[in-house]
Image: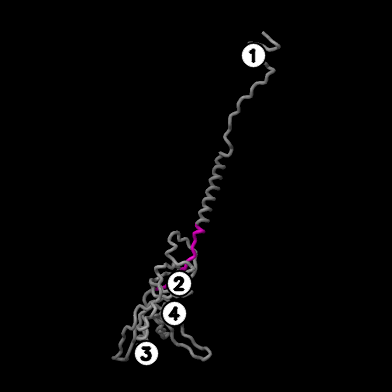
Amino acid sequence: MTVGGNDVGGSRPDPRIPAAPSPRRMSRPKWLNARVVIGVLVVVGAVVLGSRVVGAQRQLSTVWATTTDLQAGTVLTGTDLAEIEVNLDDTAGRYFGSSAAIVGKQLTRALGAGEIVPVAAVGDPVADTRLLALTVAGDQMLPGLTRGSVIDVYLVQGSGADLTTKPAAADLTVQEVTAPSSGGLSGAGSSGYQVVVRLPTKRAQELVTQLSTGTLKILLHPAG
């Protein structure tokens, strides 16, 4: 039966009524593309690495390091030290920062060139000491004898059958070596090397007296 032009109870759709649209399948978002994911991971990795580098730089400490090999007993001078920046983490307190005044302090053990100066390796010089310059003839100067070397001192006395050699001092750390000089306003100069050592005052006075009675000989300890 048709009512008002519509087929009532029929199964055929009215061609005048538009059909409902079919649902569209959801597609995977483009940002899940493998290349996009890899790019995101690279960026994240760069950020993490950068933050670690910046964090490590913030932990750098400026400390004192040696400029040359130095033996125990060396009294430090400005030329023995240089400032360097290192990352010491939790061990920074074991070493001298560059703000520490350690020039004039004395080493209690040997340090190699470029080594960071530990607090435990530095002490105050013995109060009752004197610096003594030993004059060594040019033909008696040992190769490699320099500041920081350790030497033994012997005295050769007498002559001929009465010639004797005896130890005068042992294990002395050389504080300075000065080469022979000549000229100057007075024309005066030194024909020998001046090897400066530090000794207890009483021993230095005794050695000065002994040096006037014989010829000085030096033995050099091997480096290291």
Tag 2 residue: 102
Dot 4 or dot 2, earlier in sequence: 2
Across and down, in percent, residue 133 comes to: 42, 84
Q: Nearer the viewer, residue 28 or 53?
A: 53
- Tell me which residue sits at (60%, 26%) in the image: 23
Q: For this view, does 211 lie left or right of residue 8? A: left
Q: Total marks drawn?
A: 4
Disc 3 or 4, which lies upstream in sequence?
A: 4
Mark 3 vs mark 2, CA separation in Å = 36 Å
- Circle 4: is it few (<14), some (14-19), or many (20+) Cα within 10 Å? some
Q: Residues within 10 Å of mark 1 (few under 14, many from 20)?
A: few
Q: Nearer the viewer, mark 3 or mark 2?
A: 2
Indicate whether 203 appears above or below 48.
below
What amino acid is found at the position of numbered circle 3 in the picture? Ser
Mark 3 → mark 4, Cα distance in angstroms: 22 Å
Q: Quadrant of residue 140?
A: bottom left
**Label 2 near label 3: C-beta < 8 Å?**
no
Give the CA separation, mark 2 to mark 1.
Answer: 106 Å
Question: Which amino acid does the dot numbered 1 rest on?
Answer: Arg
Give the amino acid type for the residue marked by disc 4 in the picture: Glu
Q: Which residue is mark 3?
A: 212
Whether residue 67 appears in magenta in the rendering, the answer is yes
In the image, farthest residue toward the top: 1
Of 212 and 206, nearer the camera is 206
Q: How is the image coloured?
A: one colour
How far across and how far down the image is residue 199, in percent? 38, 81
The circle on residue 12 is: 1
Q: Residues within 10 Å of mark 2 (few under 14, many from 20)?
A: many
Q: Which image quadrant: the N terminus? A: top right
Write down the region rendered in magenta: 56-71
Residue ID for mark 4? 176
- Give the side of residue 175 with respect to residue 159, left or right: right
